Amino acid sequence: MKQFKDRIAVVTGGGTGMGRELCRQLSREGCHVSLCDVSDENMQQTRALCEEDAPEGTRVTTFVADVSVEAEVGAFQRHVAEAHETDHVNLVFNNAGIGGGGSFIESEREEWEKTFDVCWGGVYYGSRAFVPMLIASEEGHLINTSSVNGFWASLGPQSAHTAYSAAKFAVKGFTEALVNDFRNNAPHVKVSLVMPGHIGTSIVINSQRILGNDPKEMSDEELDDARTRLTKMGMPFAETTNEQLRAALGLLGEAFRDQAPMTAADAATAILDGVREERWRLLIGKDAVVLDELVRGAPEDAYEESFMVALREKTEWALGL
């Protein structure tokens, strides 16, 4: 698929970050876009930005849906069919994701499962809902967002990262398995696995809100837990007051977004270039390339401090690690 004009694209998590930038760049080329997100406010901002630059006649539609709930994804699929008066789509970006449930031992089960359900369930339900519409097209492409945490289940040896990593490993395995499945059973449909490194998005801020961890609303007990967790990671928060910690947690989310080595816009461009080139494996960002090389080169060392030393020497990835 070398060009996207007059195609129909579906984007989950289109309210912010890479999802928003995918919507903007696709619609700028005259691609009709339907996006979903849990935040209608964020989606309307995305829609307005798309419509500023899109050619006349380009349709951009929005739908509020939690991708971890299959019934809501099904409702989104019906919206796409009705709003675009179509029985097919050409591009499906299963992009929505949150981070949380770091520890299988210490994290609340509800948070762990919500993170897993969004990051894996969103891809699975999105694929179940929309792959038939890709197959119904003359030319289709499924794009699933995993992560570098889909081949490296860590944020460093001082912290746990289980729910997100487990989900992203599942996305990676599922998407790789679809390469042959599509070739054998739907050869006109392509598939791509997206594995970003540190991209400048609001995933930390959005995850805090979705999981009920907004620093402004955290209880004293929750702040104590956060202080302990961050201190274990080597961050200097042991002596901070609760108000200082609230401010610091907010700044961490902003720093992840604003100090990343790659912007969401550049990441979206790299993804779309990969789609045009029909590449199934997309490492997004120099940090992702370096991390992939390090893990492949020394898999037994991937969870040791020596690995982090090598990673710090080669990349700006992993803010604060």
Image (spheres, grey):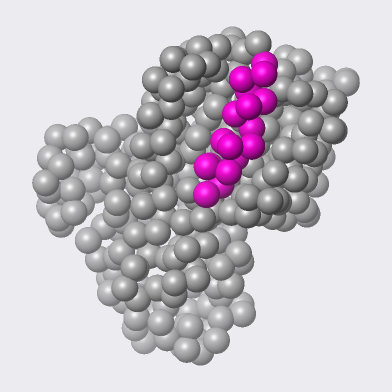
As drawn, is 132 to the left or to the right of 200? right
Image: 260 above or below 243: above
The spot of residue 227 in percent (x, y) is 39, 80
Give the residue at the far right of this rendering.
Answer: 57
Quadrant housing the C terminus: bottom left
Q: Is residue 286 magenta?
A: no
Give the residue at the far front of this rendering.
Answer: 185
Residues in magenta, as a range: 121-137
The image shows a total of numbered marks equal to: 0
The spot of residue 184 in percent (x, y) is 44, 15
The spot of residue 245 in percent (x, y) is 48, 79
Q: Residue at x 57, y 36 (%)?
A: 127
In front: 163, or 180? 180
Q: Which is the main secondary structure of the residues drawn in magenta?
A: helix
Q: Is residue 128 magenta?
A: yes
Whether residue 49 is visible: no
Whether residue 125 is visible: yes
Q: Residue at x 58, y 43 (%)?
A: 125
Residue 238 lies in quadrant? bottom left
As drawn, is 256 to the left or to the right of 296? right
Q: Residue at x 61, y 20 (%)?
A: 135
